[in-house]
Image: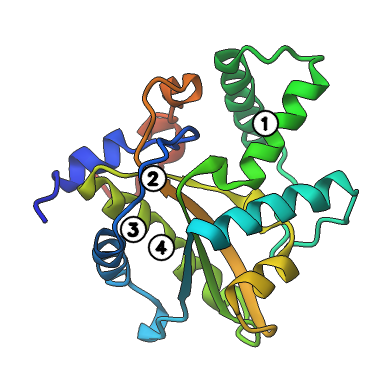
Amino acid sequence: MECMSLTEAMVSRKSIRGFLDTPVPQDALTRIIELAIQSPSASNAQPWELAVVTGAPLAELNSRAVELREAGAPVNPDVAPADLFGDCLKRRREVGIQVFKLLGIERHDMEGREQWNRKALRFFDAPVGVFIYTDGTLERARTDFDLGLLTEALCLAAMCVGLGTCIDQQALCYPELIREITGIPEGARLTAAVAIGYPDWSFPANKLDSTREPVEAVTTWHGFE
């Protein structure tokens, strides 16, 4: 597999929220994972495991997750995201506004927003969903960073075979359902989920290019002339 340069992949990677229904070959996913697990981890612990779901199991997972949402089932992810504030909250709001504008969902269109939330719950209707998890007895301080490195590597490696990805925390809302479908052990901690598939470049939200702060805004230099 001949890949684009690392520089090209890092600069051009974006979150894909609309996918073609084209199946993804298992050998392509195997190669992506082979690359991703080269990621560094503290003391080479390699605390990660992955469950890759497609076809009928993914369809069942998605439909039942939506049913749980419709029934008002409590959301109970293993790793609940903390609240954002300050500039971080501002940037999150800005990207949300941009996505809804591309989709034509107005601020007060509650039904449109609900349908979008359900799409996110369904891995944005990607043909493949990947769950990244670890032994739940391991401290989060020791494992979350390592699993984050693996997640980014997975997203970059996917680009080598023309695939797009979206890190999708909403897909983790109902961990007991995920365990039932995948057989992930009860004691495991589900940390990340990634939608994978071939991008549908006609999908409006895929036109979003989120911005990054400049180097001078996030970096201080010490000991340089």
Q: Residues within 10 Å of mark 1 (few under 14, many from 20)?
A: some
Circle on res. 197:
2
Q: Secondary structure at mark 4?
A: helix
Could you tell me residue 112's position as x and y percent?
A: 73, 22
Q: Residues within 10 Å of mark 4 (few under 14, many from 20)?
A: some
Mark 4 against mark 3, which lies toward the viewer?
Answer: 3
Q: Secondary structure at mark 2?
A: strand
> Is residue 92 visible in the rendered structure shown here?
yes
Q: Which residue sits at x=13%, y=45%?
A: 5
Mark 4 against mark 2, which lies toward the viewer?
Answer: 2
> Is residue 78 visible in the rendered structure shown here?
no
| Mark 3 or mark 1, earlier in chain | 1
Quadrant housing the C terminus: top left
Residue position for label 4: 149
Q: Amino acid at mark 1?
A: Trp
| Mark 4 or mark 2, earlier in chain | 4
